[in-house]
Image: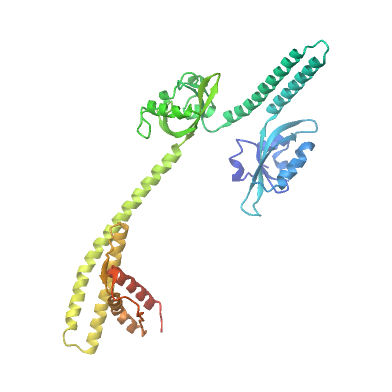
Amino acid sequence: MAIQVSPLLLGLERLAPAALLSSDGKIQECTPAFCEILGLAEEEAVGKILVDYVHGDERDCVQDALRAAKESTSIDLRILRNSSDCAWFETTLTRCGLDDETAGILCTFHDISRWRRLEDVARESLDECFALAKLRSNSSQGQAPNAKELREQVIELRQALEAGLESEKFKRIFEMSMDPIFLIGEDTTVHQCNDAALRILKLSDMSEIVHKLTVPMVSPEFQPDGSRTIDKLQKFCQPLFAGETVTGEWWHYNAEGTLFPVLVKLQNVVSNGKNYMVCVWHDLTEIKKREAELEKAKEAAEAASQAKSQFLANISHEIRTPMNGVIGVAELLLRTELTEEQRSYLEVIRSSGDTLLNIISDVLDISKIEARSIVLESIPFSLQDAIDDSLSSVRVLTLQKNLELNVFVEDALPSKVIGDPTRIRQILLNLLSNAIKFTERG
């Protein structure tokens, strides 16, 4: 029976052996590669405790790491394959989960046995050299200057071996990086690159790049900002060789002739008196594609909004003309001799017409706001008159619902204010209309 692997581990299956542990270190889910390291069949791994497969000298470190509240911890462990065989692994424990029910620890292994063996060899070599230096300095036949020279040689050897260990770490990072990495000379010739560089350039062999390709050979004549590639390259090199890290967008061609964008990060290194550039690319193709799609969607949305605003403006003007006619005729009829009942009906017609005109004005205002063409007036007007006009427009509505509408105005209210009287009336009318609409009695 195969183990069911969660989406959290699927992406890690090809990159590194991984497992999902409980907070006490019990294996809940794991990849086949993880099982292989422990020497277990897939169906046997779930439920086992990780610490049981760790060398005794490192078990306390694992327990401490499992109990720690840190988000991520990295430790070097020896994993027991059987009673006599073990291997070194760089082990990363990462807290994951959004709550107590889903909380767990993601455990990944990276084999560092080769590096540890190199470290042991280096340590043994240093011990032998120091022992020899001590023997020479204590020997009655040895001369002090020779012993001093030997000690200097030992120090040089230590530095060389330490540099070798650091070089091994860099090599691992260089080879495993998902981003293309290049070592480029002052003449922009590529001296070294990783497998990711081959993939992005659609090439199959290092010999097609190393000591053959230059930066201009895989670049267009002009870059995204409009500058010539040669000029921009020189502009990059000036601060770079002064010790600064340079970052910027760049366009390149692959072997198929396809142009693609990358984010370039450059760092200067000096070796044997010569300047080199360590160049890291990050492919921006998908990001640029999403940006173009978002820009296209934004333009389509703006066009749709503009069309809607134009339609609302047109239809509002079309409705306003006959509505003005209805209100005008109602006002003319109100000036004739009418019965109380007839006058009441005409008042309702005129009031409803005024309300509808106000709604149409609101629609027009919305269109103007969306088109950013609305202009507010700033003129002196009577706030009391604006209040009275708004009350007159809703008075019939209060009578229809048998509501009492009372207005209280502070004595300190100035007779004249400066602003947009039309907008003030609209605000007051909206507030009063909503108050009447949602008030059943009172």
The residue lying toward the viewer, choosing from 199 and 144, is 144
Judge from the rendering whether residue 79 lies leftward or rightward of residue 414; answer left or right.
Answer: right
- Toward which corner of the image does residue 271 lie, by quadrant? top right
Q: Residue 362, percent across and down?
A: 30, 66
How many marks the image carries: the answer is 0
* Quadrant of the drawing holding the N terminus: top right
Identified at 50% across, 20% down, the residue is: 210
Q: Is residue 152 above or below residue 201?
A: above
Q: Residue 320, percent across and down?
A: 22, 68
* Quadrant of the drawing holding the C terminus: bottom left
Q: Residue 402, percent across and down?
A: 36, 85
Most extreme residue toward the top is: 141
Q: Is residue 442 above or below residue 93?
A: below
Please indicate, yes or no, whether residue 26 appears anywhere in the rendered image: no
Identified at 70% across, 24% down, the residue is: 118
Most extreme residue toward the bottom is: 339
Colour scheme of the rendered structure: rainbow
Q: Is residue 340 above or below residue 173?
A: below
Identified at 66% across, 48% down, the residue is: 104
Judge from the rendering whether residue 309 lies leftward or rightward of residue 43; answer left or right.
Answer: left
Most extreme residue toward the front is: 144
- Toward which corner of the image does residue 43 lie, by quadrant? top right
The residue lying toward the viewer, choosing from 100 and 57, is 57
Q: Residue 5, percent across and down?
A: 63, 44
Please indicate, yes or no, whether residue 117 appears anywhere in the rendered image: yes
